[in-house]
Image (spheres, rainbow, N blue to C red):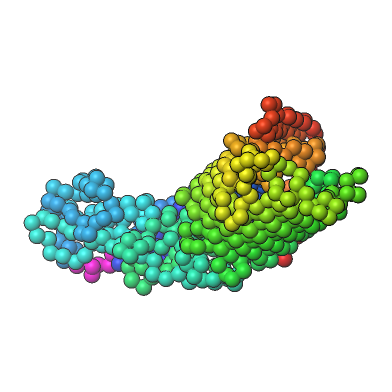
Amino acid sequence: MVFPMRIDKPNLHAGRASGASAGLAACGVLITLLGSGPVFAQEPPGQRDTPLDMPSMPESSGKETGQSERVLPPAPRPEDTERLIALPEVMVKKIIIRDASLLSSVEVASTVGPFEGRRVSVEELQQLRYRLSLLYFDKGYVNSGVLLPDQEVKDGIIYFQEVRGTLDEVQLSGNHKLRDSYILARVAGPAEGEALQINDLQTSLQLLERNPVIRRIDAQLMPGVKPGESVLRMNVSENPRWQVVAGADNHRSPAIGGEQGTLLVRNQSLTGRSDRLDMFFSYAEGLGDGYLSYTAPVNPRETTMSLYASRSETDIVEGDFDDIDIESKITTLGVLFNHPLHRSLTANFSAFAGFEYKHTKNKLLGQRFSFTPGEKNGETDLSVFQAGIEFSRLSPERVLAMRFTLRRGLHIFGATEAPATGPRAGAPDGQFTSLLWQAQYIRNLGWRDSQLFFRGSAQRAPDPLLSPEKMPVGGYNTVRGYRENLFVRDNGLTASAEWQVPVFETEWSSSNAFDPRRLKGAVFFDYGASQDNDDARGDLLGIRAQGLRRRGRRYSG
């Protein structure tokens, strides 16, 4: 028999129906996982000044969930208790469950107590078996329970036998972009000698469905050949392997052209292990930017390793500066490891660590030239160790995400070093320490599906920093209305509050790229502060404005 069960993320509600095999509460479970929320493009993992990525807001299915009517498992076949049936009643002094490990002694004692110390009929013993089996079911052991074996009653002792349910086979279908081994390693079946726990299984399936490659998982837990055995049948619906996203914006400084075109090419499962390849390109009048990264899981606990490289070439094209041919080139290579310390449907906590090498070269009129303190003949080299923690908590009403990053400059691989004496003594160099904090918060208000957004970031560096490690303030991602990277200094603080309200209230859906429901009005306030360590006072800037934002769809295939 099959027990139908629907799971509407993020709440789990289990329905019950009848079914047994040889007196067990053995059952099957139909698990339906609804599609995930929108997938947000992730920023390059090694960039210290990128906005914090937010987890997707859980979406309600719009359906009421609840428990169906409970139906007790059927009684065992008469031959299983033949000698007990021959007795109209039996004197019961004590009831023992052999090999009992899934129920506590208190649960067992409170259930069997009313049947001890008196004469009990066979029908009452069957009722007791029902109650005991339901204790297993209520604790999530849906194919575990007790048997009332054939026995001779001696000294008034009745024996029940515990049978632990197992997951003996997983049958997969529909997965073409993810390997069977990748999926099976993440399905939480019981360990050797342990019983199948349906709640753990459901949680692992819902966490697996958050993989951007997976659109939907439909699963059935079916009874096996023997009592307590089960078979999990999974059908996986997948999203496209490739994504191509093109865009245009004015999120660059006017000094290098302002307006830019961007192109993101992503493969979400390059070798079938959910290993992601990202290629990002941007072009402006004075900019050529390229980024390549590869992220792969290291183990089933979702520990990941990221390798990344970027190259950026800029020319100052603004006004008279175009005539003096100011050029800058930045090359970055890095590796980053991320390990989840806690993963659940509502919270995630992880730690990360990595190494990054960065080389910059500046020229003026075709010759190397030092524009900022610390540069040596127009060049800098940085070897940076970085480590930190990330935390996110989400519910249908709110999402909170935070990240803390420590960056430490090391004197290895030719890192720039300031001399102890001379005109460059005390200048910024490759040995430094900086702390970066980032946070975002989203709150659903309910009224017209409006939302509140809060975000903030702060950097503190006790030492003067080379230009690539300074914090930029101003522009689209920090203080809107000011030019990009208006201030680039050692220490900085940004804060933003925004209220978004859909312009149109519609119930119909559109398959076109332009959906009127995605047009939102936004009122926002941004604030930023910036200061160098050698400044007596930092420059402050703030802006308050109104605007409209259209959140268009991605084009992928």
**Above or below, comparing residue 556 to residue 415 in the picture:** below
Q: How many marks?
A: 0
In the visual, does 524 lie left or right of 38? right
Task: Return the residue nearer the eye: 389 or 31.
Answer: 389
Task: Return the residue nearer the eye: 507 or 99.
Answer: 99
In the visual, does 491 lie left or right of 97? right
* Residue at horizontal 36 percent and vertical 68 percent from the top: 229
Res 418 → quadrant: top right
* Residue at horizontal 49 percent and vertical 54 percent from the top: 339
Residue 76 counted in the magenta span: yes
* Residue at horizontal 68 percent and vertical 44 percent from the top: 374
Task: Return the residue nearer the eye: 361 or 282.
Answer: 361
Highlighted magenta segment, given as a residue range: 74-82
Q: Position of residue 426 (x, y in %)?
A: 63, 38
Q: Position of residue 314 (x, y in %)?
A: 80, 53
**Image quadrant where one finds the N terminus:** bottom left
Res 143 → quadrant: bottom left
In the visual, does 227 lie left or right of 176? left
* Residue extending furthest toward the top: 536
Q: Position of residue 263 (x, y in %)?
A: 76, 59
Q: Is residue 216 visible?
A: no
Res 498 → quadrant: top right
**Image quadrant where one finds the C terminus:** bottom right
Task: Return the residue nearer the eye: 447 or 453.
Answer: 453
